Amino acid sequence: MRAKYGAAALAKVDAALKALAAADKRRGVDTLVVPVDLASAMKPYDAAPVPARPDAKALKAAIDALARARQPHYLMLLGGPDLLPMVPLKNPAHGGELGDEDRIVPSDLPYACEAAYSTDPNRFLGPTRVVGRLPDLPGATRPDLLLQLIRAASRHKGLPRASFADSFALSAEVWQGSTRLSLTNTFGHADRLHLSPPDGPKWSKADLAPRMHFINCHGAADMPEYYGQRGEDFPVSMRSTLLRDRVTAGTVVAAECCYGAQLFDPALADGDWPMALRYLTDGACAFLGSTTIAYGPSEGNGSADLLCQYFLQRVLAGASLGRALLEARQKFAGERTHLDPMDLKTLGQFYLLGDPSLQPVAGVSHALARTKAFRKAFASVEDRGVRGLRRERLEREGRNLARSLPRLIPSEAAPAPAVLEAVRPMLKESGLDAERCARVSYRISGAPGHRAIHVYKGWVERRLLALIATEQDGRLLHVRRMHAR
């Protein structure tokens, strides 16, 4: 950070962090700032400092050492990927030019897991840690955004559940069936859903006033916009420059879009900021989104739909932002017999931008907890003790997932004849040709019998579509169709 901003700016960041630590103390959180690039700071943990030009492997080792020694309830990464790099996971859904073009999935998931550094996403099926990232602006020479976000976190106060009753929801028109289901699962209704087209991108302050935002649109790499869809028409549904002075303080955002939370230098987009950073600088306290191409069905729910709604559901239930993501990840992984390539990518690509310790929805105390005797007995340990019990449960759940979930092993084996015969007409109905579209296959290690997954991918109406077929002992066991968000 000193190299990026200079000593004087770093002193301002240090002062802001001291104020944040004081605010955390009042909220029952003891905060320790650890400059992982200083040998003196890492020596107590028997860990090497992260080099001046940081790499993800060194950062992962440093975080693991800190986590083992301190057992923190929250881990906050301070800065964007140019300061604290993400782990470049291999993309299990990669399909080259005819399929998913992402060779890697930049991910913060490994920092939430106890497994040692690896680029294999199969190693990180059981997250146990509460992790979030408070970003700065890529390419910036002054830490203005970082200072603003630190100070906003210091001022944050939880609000009653009623303050989050309304939502701003936006969907590409072609995905409205899926989005309506997500909204109903999360808020109990989908009455205020906006569709693009015709709606957007000039949203009013009243439109964006609700503190819960759910967005299911298209996104693109290094672009400050999201897009709707009707047929082959992809109009702009949101533009980051049009969010200025329109977002309510404390807003929580979940965006399913491809590259929805990608952080890039605004110079790549004619000076326009990434959507996530514009949301945060305009008042949002959290943004959950993807670093790469994300997936979900046009109707029903799957992959990105589920992880995003699970996160919002836990926020509404009173969880801290970081715990909401950890519980969402565990629920997403734990509900499956195995994770197919799209689900495995989903688990790795979505991450939290925001202070993980913030609790948007204030907890409601039970009658006993409001008595003088109770407050006296737990005056110094109540929050820490209860959090500790929750972390024990979450660690146990994560370790169980890491031990029990089967792994995907790349395979050159073609689908069994009966499977190909059953899948071929489904591909045709989806606009794909079995002989010309891309296919990647995996065997599932640890599953009973011979189980394999075959992913067919191709471009339909200028957008990526995938058909995922599960084979069991030579027969078709399950199939689903997914669209790139």
Image: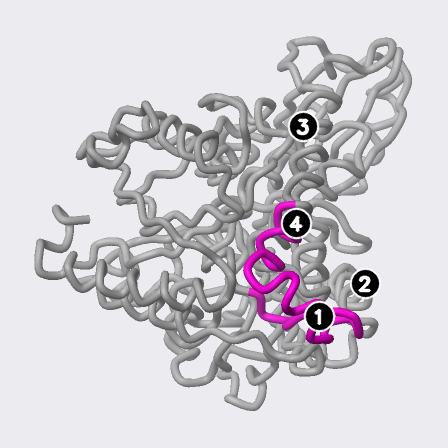
The Cα–Cα distance between marks 3 and 4, rounded to whole angstroms, is: 23 Å
Q: Is residue 87 above or below residue 229?
A: above
User: From the viewer's perspective, is the residue at label 2 or at label 4 nearer?
Assistant: 2
Cβ–Cβ under 8 Å for marks 2 and 1: no
How far apart are the two marked residues, 2 and 3, measured between alpha carbons? 28 Å
Q: Nearer the viewer, residue 113 or 21?
A: 21
Quarter residue 23 falls in: bottom left
The span picked out in magenta is 359-388
First reached walking from the N terminus: tag 2 or tag 1: 2
User: Which mark is nearer the camera, 3 or 1?
Assistant: 1
Residue beneath label 2, please?
185
What crowding class fits label 3: few (fewer than 14 Cα within 10 Å), some (14-19), or many (20 or more)? some
Q: Nearer the viewer, residue 219 or 310?
A: 310
Instruction: Tell me if residue 230 can be seen.
Output: no
Q: As shown in the figure, which amino acid type bears the numbered disc 2?
A: Asn
Q: Quadrant of residue 99?
A: top right
| Residue 445 seen in the figure | yes
| Dot 2: element | helix
The residues tagged by marks 2 and 4 sit, at their Cα atoms, a distance apart of 14 Å
- Identified by mark 1, the residue type is Ala
Image position, residue 402 (x, y; %): 67, 25
Q: CA distance from mark 4 to mark 1?
A: 46 Å
Q: Nearer the viewer, residue 484 or 342?
A: 342
Q: Is 273 situated left or right of 419 in this image?
A: left
Q: Which residue is mark 3?
A: 399
Q: Which residue is mark 1?
A: 373
Q: Mark 1: which secondary structure?
A: helix
Question: Residue 304: which disc?
Answer: 4
- Identified by mark 4, the residue type is Ala
Residue 105 position, x and y percent, is 48, 36
